[in-house]
Image: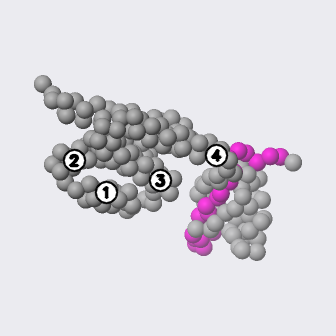
Amino acid sequence: MLSDTELLFVAGSLVNLLFASIIVRYIYYLRNGEHTYIFTFLAFNTVVYFIMGLFTSVEISIGAGFGLFALFSVLRYRTETVPIREMTYLFVMVALPVLNSILLRTGAYAQLLLSDAVIILILWALEKGFGFRPELRRKQVVYEKIDLVRADRREEMIADLRERTGLDVVRCEVERIDFLRDTAEISVYYAGGPVEKK
């Protein structure tokens, strides 16, 4: 039979997972349609919650815990660069269980629900872009018109990319040029919808 403390811990883990799932499924995923980081977000969130439970149960310093989670939050994976938006969500997924665990242990249940709801509301509002200009999206393309990959012909390259992709290309950055193959890797920044035909 579980004790009251153990039942509270299990209930808290379910509440934490519920709020994390709402953020990942109904805010992050709906905006990006990206599966790549969902496993990472939910795994980090769950593990951090249980580690915090261990810290509080054996009376390890909360400062030591925050130090560990700060290290997690600035983690960079060596295999690929994690985009800044995903790093922000990862930080939220790490901070959320820390917050929930501390508030649960202090018995501040109303504050726990309120703070989680406010975090979800803020993320949702930011993703919807309320009060802000729509965010530019980015795609990487391999571009073969090497003669346009020059600083003095940048506007021509942007016009060509708009014509060929149908996207409202705002700017582009040349990442790498391969003179052997006459191609360039370009980061294309564009507004959300397709380009309007004039």
Please give the residue where the numbered disc 2 appears in the rendered image. Answer: 56
Please give the residue where the numbered disc 3 appears in the rendered image. Answer: 88
Q: Residue furthest left?
A: 1
Mark nearest the camera among 3 and 2 is 2
Task: Name the residue rendered at 71%, 55% in the picture.
Answer: 169
* Mark 3 secondary-structure assignment: helix
Residue 190 on the magenta span: yes
Q: Position of residue 63 (x, y in %)?
A: 28, 59
Please give the residue where the numbered disc 1 appears in the rendered image. Answer: 66
Of label 3 and label 1, which has the lower sequence position? 1
Is residue 47 visible in the rendered structure shown here?
no
Dominant secondary structure of the residues highlighted in magenta in the image? strand
Q: Residue furthest top?
A: 1
Taking the image as shown, residue 40 lies to the left or right of residue 61, namely right
Of label 2 and label 4, which has the lower sequence position? 2
Indicate the quadrant containing the N terminus: top left, top right, bottom left or bottom right: top left
Residue 67 on the magenta span: no
Q: Which residues make up the magenta segment? A: 176-197
Mark nearest the camera among 3 and 1 is 1
Q: Position of residue 36 (x, y in %)?
A: 44, 45
Residue 129 circle label: 4
